[in-house]
Amino acid sequence: MSDTLLSVQGVETYYGNIRALGGVNVDVKKGEIVSLIGANGAGKSTLMMTICGSPQARTGTITFDGEDITRLPTHLIARRRIAQSPEGRRIFPRMTVYENLQMGASLDNLKYFDEDVEKIFTLFPRLKERQAQRGGTLSGGEQQMLSIGRALMARPKLLLLDEPSLGLAPLIIRQIFDAIKVLNEEQGLTVFLVEQNAFAALKLSHRAYVMVNGQVTMSGSGKELLANPEVRAAYLEGGRH
Amino acid sequence: MANISNTHESAGGNLTARALREGFYAGVISLGLFVLFVGLETTQNIRNELVLNQRWGLLAVFVIVAAVGRFLSVAYLRPWLAARKAAASATASTETEESFFKRNFSKIAIVALIFYPPLMVVLFGVQGSLKWVDNFGIQILIYVMLAWGLNIVVGLAGLLDLGYVAFYAVGAYSYALLSQYFGLSFWVLLPLAGILAAFWGMILGFPVLRLKGDYLAIVTLAFGEIIRLVLINWTEVTKGTFGVSGIPKASVFGIWSFDVSAPNNFAKVFELPMSSAYYKIFLFYLILALALLTAYVTIRLRRMPIGRAWEALREDEIACRSLGINTVTTKLTAFAIGAMFGGFAGSFFAVRQGFVSPESFVFLESAIILAIVVLGGMGSLIGIAVAAVVMVGGTELLREMTFLKSIFGPDFTPELYRMLIFGLAMVVVMVLKPRGFVGSREPTAFLKERKNVSGSFTKEGHG
Ligand SMILES: Nc1ncnc2c1ncn2[C@@H]1O[C@H](COP(=O)(O)OP(=O)(O)OP(=O)(O)O)[C@@H](O)[C@H]1O
Ligand SMILES: [Mg+2]
């Protein structure tokens, strides 16, 4: 549990002249689930996207598996096996569920596709039922499952999830969080997770970071943060699901 | 729903009154629009003086057509369309088994096309078949091929290209010039023209990699114009607006020639009467083969990683990148392969005409090809072929409609109204089939049995 897989050091990201991230330090170790919580506009999604190289960090370094990936183009970062289920899901709406999953496996040119797609279908049986349906016609929850499934098809070393619970019913959120837990425990998948649903995220995570205005203000184990009065006041009270 | 049936019941007379009113307005508007354009015509007489002709009769025809058309549209067409839509949504849930004809449409069409020239010869004689094989067959197939080529760029990769005719021009001039200056044969130059066009496709691709949608369209439009202007102004090589003439004919793989003087002339070898029809029939099969090659390559590519990447790119570029797809090479290959087929079609065009000039490669050609792709349903090969037959065949048919002279007067030339009809046909198709002839995308991969998800449910758009 001590090997660092992803290390973000002093990263600053700008949109034009607006600084969205102001010196962020985040570490994710192999086999961990780490979550990032924070208010709207704090810069969580920006951090996710910066890790993937679009936009690129202006200063600071991002190291993955011992390699500096700060200046790599997005598709090369993805080829280092960082898969993302981005904010807004971004599935391919006119392609079928099955084809979307194929796209996820394009790194290995479908070499392990048949084997992996069965795993995804076991994880999300709904996708199996809907495999011939166009992505754009899926329900929000199904789209989220597809987005995660597609990311998993790339056989990632690190899975980035941006608000997997957004707009979903509590039951579906449970399913998705359970799935993340299963992937982590059974396959040792490392997960870095952005969540508004702080309670569920902190319960699930080994460690967590709190982001305010583009800076990490607090970090600790999931349990510590759950018990922290400041965190409770800002992200949990009145929002317990 | 209740709303619609309401208007139906209460509005028998109401509707007619409204239709009459709208028809009247349409007539007034078209009178205002056309009074100067159609009602008056200026010509020069022998002494170079400007003469004003009055064409009130023709103007009256225009106004009446507009008024009656509007009346019919409001009173009959629209209620009929609404009823049809309601009926369609009522029956849409029951999937009907497709008929044999529909399922095997492409195979039947290919067989029919193979037997098309002999059939025309039988029906109209060797000389009489010329018109049918050349004007209808070859002409339509060129557009089918061009539209299939452009479909790779626009329909699959989603890159709106308004300058596709540039690659057509590169192919045509490659053949015209290289055969003139170096005496190379068609069969050597055909692949070469494709490669050159693909090369130019990449050259265009590089600067526009970061552009999307409208911006991309404008730059490709400019690119098309640049190529045309170069052809016009580089007179030492391209002979400018005069064009290149005397382009050698293609031979049947060098075995039989179609040159009248050659000893291995096709007609002489087979002891047939001399006619240009054989050459046209040969060209028909040539363009058919080229078009089918385009279709075959498109179908194969769609099932390959690059084809899937194109389609994904059209849907979401950012998602593509985060899945490890190199969007730069993906776009460039789309441009290059699309351009290559444009180049093939271009060299075929040169060999068919025996003459090329910049006039054949104006923006209008790009627009027509793009219109065919859009009408066909963006990505559907069969839809595009149908659109090409309707649009190009339809406008060719206009030439045949000599009876129109008896309505509009003896100096009415139907060809002049080609674009008007083209536009009208486009509007009609888009009203009836807003997503093109074949609007639903055919999936490329299935797990086990294929579930039919009706295209009519899947609305265009995202999320
Ligand atoms: N493309 C962009 N151009 C300019 N500013 C942007 C862009 N994307 C994000 N921002 C700004 O950067 C800041 C951080 O945005 P970000 O999307 O990272 O927030 P977030 O923490 O993910 O919020 P949420 O919880 O609402 O998703 C916001 O102030 C936002 O307005
Ligand atoms: Mg966000």
Image (cartoon, rainbow, N blue to C red):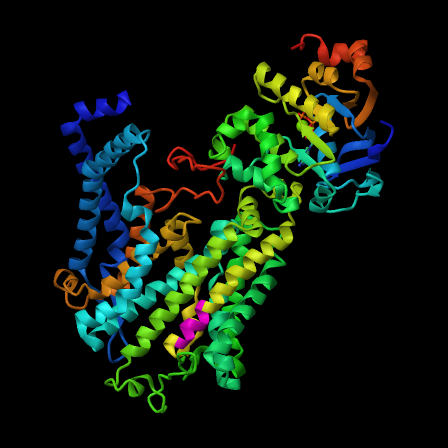
Residue B276 is drawn in which quadrant? Answer: bottom left
Residue A4 is at least partly visible in this image: yes
Q: Is residue B383 shown in magenta?
A: no
Tell me the quarter of the image containing the N terminus of chain B.
top left
Relative to A127, is A59 on the left or the right?
right
Compare residues A158 and A119 and report the one nearer the observer. A119
* Position in image of residue B270 (x %, y %): 28, 84
Vertical side of B389 occupied by A6: above or below: above
Vertical side of B377 occupied by B142: above or below: below
* Position in image of residue B229 (x %, y %): 51, 71
Which segment did they paint magenta?
Answer: B345-351
* Position in image of residue B72 (x %, y %): 18, 41
* Position in image of residue B127 (x %, y %): 21, 77
Residue A123 is drawn in which quadrant? Answer: top right
Compare residues A100 and A166 and report the one nearer the observer. A100
Relative to A93, is B419 on the left or the right?
left
Residue B240 is at least partly visible in this image: no
Vertical side of B254 occupied by B383: above or below: above
Residue visible at 33% across and 46% down? B103
Compare residues B240 and B149 and report the one nearer the observer. B149
